[in-house]
Image: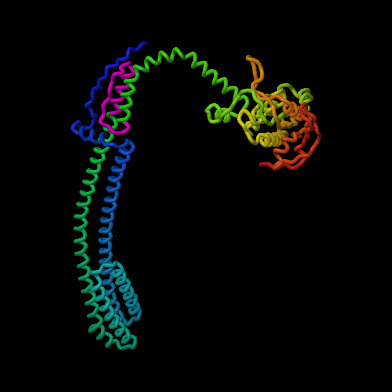
Amino acid sequence: MQLTPTLEPRVLAEESDLGPFPDFLRPLVDRVARVKATVHTKLLVGFFTIALLLLALGVLSVLVLNRVNDQVQTLTTLQAQADNARQMIYGVTAQSHFRAMALVTEDASWNDKISVAKGKFGEDLESIRSYGFVENEAVLDDLGATDARFALASNEVTGLYNEGDLDAALRVHIASEHEVSHELEDTLNVFIAESADRVVAETEAFQSDRRFLIFAVAAFSGLSLVAALLLGGTLSWSLIRPVRRVDRALGLIADGDFGQIVEVPNRDEFGNLTSNLNRTSQQLATLYQDLEDLNSNLQETVELKVEELDRATELRRYVSPQLAESILAGDTEVTLGSKRSYLTTFFSDIRGFTELSERMEPEEIVDELNEYLSAMTDIVFRHGGTLDKYVGDAIMVFFGDPVPQEDHAERAVRMALEMRQRIEEVTTGWKQQYGESFAIGMGITTGWVTVGHIGSNVRSDYTVLGNQVNLASRLADRAEAGQILVSERTMLAVTDFAHGSVVDEVQLKGVNRPIKIYDLSAGPIEQE
């Protein structure tokens, strides 16, 4: 559908609806919107404020609970104190009763009960002291002193009783021990009455504090809720309103009305968004015309993209996917033109492949060969090699191009070592599955070669040519199963980690002196 753009600038009509938010709070919403801060900062301030309100409510609740807990603890302690005092009165009364029974019945076991009752009296006295009420100290000291006199009188009566002078024991009991017991009872009754008065006072204070604390918590909770709702509503509508205006403007622009101008009070990301939207709407008419120009150049663009795809496909044939992506992204510079370069060339060849093909079924030989080539290709790419081609069961690789590598000889040798180790690892599996397994011979040379696109306009390969390439192929053909044969230059480049012995010398065309051939499998190899 052909659109006819509208270019006349006009301000988008303002919405007055704030949803459930009262409209009279619009000035507050606009004031928040005009605050010069990012949306992230505004949201953080809002969340932080609400979090502070919640924290304050939590602190207030803890204080209230602590206050209530202290008062309940005080009431509980006062009640326990009164109970102890009643037990002490009972103990004093029991001692008098036990003494009377001892004097009347002349049964000495009642005196033992007096001793037990005195011990219980002392324990109750210490329990009251442990409650820690300062105002009790004077009374408790007085009780302690009186109890000491009571103990002296009791000891005197018990002594007379033990001597058999019951009449004297009775007189001392009535004149002294019995009188002191009444003093203890009177003091304890006063103490119990005072404790009861304090319980009443603490209960009234507890009820008063509880009413106040409930009101304080309720009032603070209500104020916090209102503040949170007001803050959340104000903040949310200061963000929702510009979003709605931008949404309406985008809908009109999508219908071809490019003259819309959005005005918002925001001085944050939404303010920037509306500013950019206004600029965009003003430029859409120009871009509309540019679209037609772009369509006219579409064929050229498509051809360029096809060329880039062809280049990407070609790169992935030779180098690892990671390196291909780096080259296509422009992170790695390469030159694919023909040139002379000092490189390292590698060949590998399966020993006795023809005989294996005759002994194995076609499907089996294809499966095993595919597994072998996949494993070897992964190793090639892992060491940064450029995969030239597969020639039947042979693999041709070179190092140092299209990406320059100072250590191309070392990379090639380490790759060959890993290939040999990998073949040894999978041999057992192949024998179990197919009844046969592969063994390879490898050849590596380092020297000057011609590298570049070789072929016709219809079909070409990025490959290497030269004496060193031929020598590498010859070494691979000559190598026995598991053997790695390298040229003299290759050996010199890897002497820091590999050792080998000379097995032969060959004469190359254009080279004045024979070239020594080394067998890397003849000596120990230092791995990385």
Identify the magenta region: 242-269
Q: Quadrant of the N terminus?
A: top left
Front one among 299 and 348:
299
Q: How many marks?
A: 0
Q: In this view, does 413 lie to the left or right of 129?
A: right
- Position in image of residue 424 (x %, y %): 72, 35
- Position in image of residue 367 (x %, y %): 69, 25
The extreme front residue here reads 512
**Based on the displayed image, in which of its 4 quarters is residue 73 positioned?**
bottom left
Instruction: Give the residue drawn at x 34%, y 22%.
Output: 280
The extreme right residue here reads 504
Res 439 seen here = no
**Based on the displayed image, in which of its 4 quarters is residue 144 positioned?**
bottom left
Magenta residue check for 254: yes
- Position in image of residue 78 (x %, y %): 25, 64
Q: In this view, does 488 lie to the left or right of 336?
A: right
